[in-house]
Image (spheres, rainbow, N blue to C red):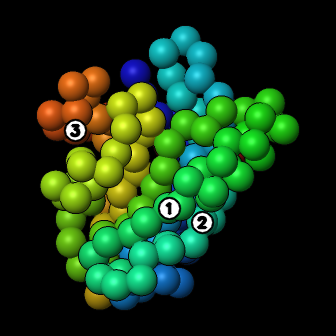
């Protein structure tokens, strides 16, 4: 299964990461799933509600998840997952990310060295929650 990401969605993720640097940003991925592919129609910026260690941690409250799910439902879409940034670290999930993730969702991470977004990768947590597997990202031109 691949995650299809529009140029606009990728641009918005990168812009959010740049704006929040040196702190982690976070948001929701809204879109569709058909034929083994997930297509992100758009992203929804969410607040990093973490009060400490915001340079290397983020927290999305259950209330924000519910709001994102309701918005997706109203628009006939699915909440496909979440994105966040890794300021001055690679776009690889941390142990903290693994402990706080759920199977099924896609987790996009963008690396932000010295304030400039670079590598963007997507991950899916295994059903047994033991580790992440990388999910291919297809860039859509539209």
Q: Nearer the viewer, residue 20 or 64?
A: 64
| Extreme residue in the right direction | 74
Q: Earlier in the sequence, mark 3 or mark 2?
A: 2
Cβ atoms under marks 2 and 1 closer than 8 Å: yes
| Extreme residue in the top direction | 35
Identify the residue at horizontal 55%, vertical 12% (top origin): 35
What residue sits right under mark 1 in the picture?
A: 60
In this picture, residue 42 sits left or right of residue 131: right
Secondary structure, mark 2, is: strand
Give the class, few, some or many, for how many residues have Cα within 10 Å of label 1's Cα (few <14, many ≥20): some
Q: Nearer the viewer, mark 2 or mark 1?
A: 1
Q: Residue 118 location, x and y as percent?
A: 34, 68
Q: What whole-number distance in Å separates the C-alpha atoms at marks 2 and 1?
A: 7 Å
What residue sits right under mark 2 in the picture?
A: 46
- Asked if residue 128 can be seen in this view, the reply is yes
- Residue 131 quadrant: top left
- Asked if residue 122 can be seen in this view, the reply is no
Cβ atoms under marks 3 and 1 closer than 8 Å: no
Identify the residue at horizontal 59%, vertical 33% (top origin): 39
Disc ID at residue 101: none
**Quarter of the rendering occupied by the N terminus:** top left
Please tell me whether residue 26 is drawn above or below residue 81 in the rendered image. Answer: below
Secondary structure, mark 3, is: strand
Disc ID at residue 132: 3
Q: Residue 127 location, x and y as percent?
A: 28, 24
Q: What whole-number distance in Å separates the C-alpha atoms at marks 3 and 1?
A: 19 Å
In this picture, residue 84 sits left or right of residue 132: right
Q: Nearer the viewer, mark 3 or mark 1?
A: 1
């Amino acid at each position: 299964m691949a995650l299809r990401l529009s140029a606009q969605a990728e641009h918005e993720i990168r812009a959010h990461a740049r704006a929040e640097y040196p702190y982690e940003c976070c948001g929701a991925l809204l879109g569709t799933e058909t034929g083994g592919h997930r297509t992100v129609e758009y992203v929804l910026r969410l607040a990093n509600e973490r009060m400490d260690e915001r340079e290397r941690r983020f927290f999305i409250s259950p209330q924000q998840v519910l709001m994102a799910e309701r918005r997706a439902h109203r628009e006939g879409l699915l909440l496909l997952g979440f994105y966040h940034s890794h300021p001055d670290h690679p776009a690889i999930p941390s142990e903290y990310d693994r402990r706080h993730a759920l199977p099924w969702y896609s987790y996009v991470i963008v690396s932000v060295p010295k304030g400039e977004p670079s590598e963007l990768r997507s991950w899916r947590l295994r059903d047994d929650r033991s580790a992440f597997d990388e999910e291919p990202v297809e860039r859509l031109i539209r």
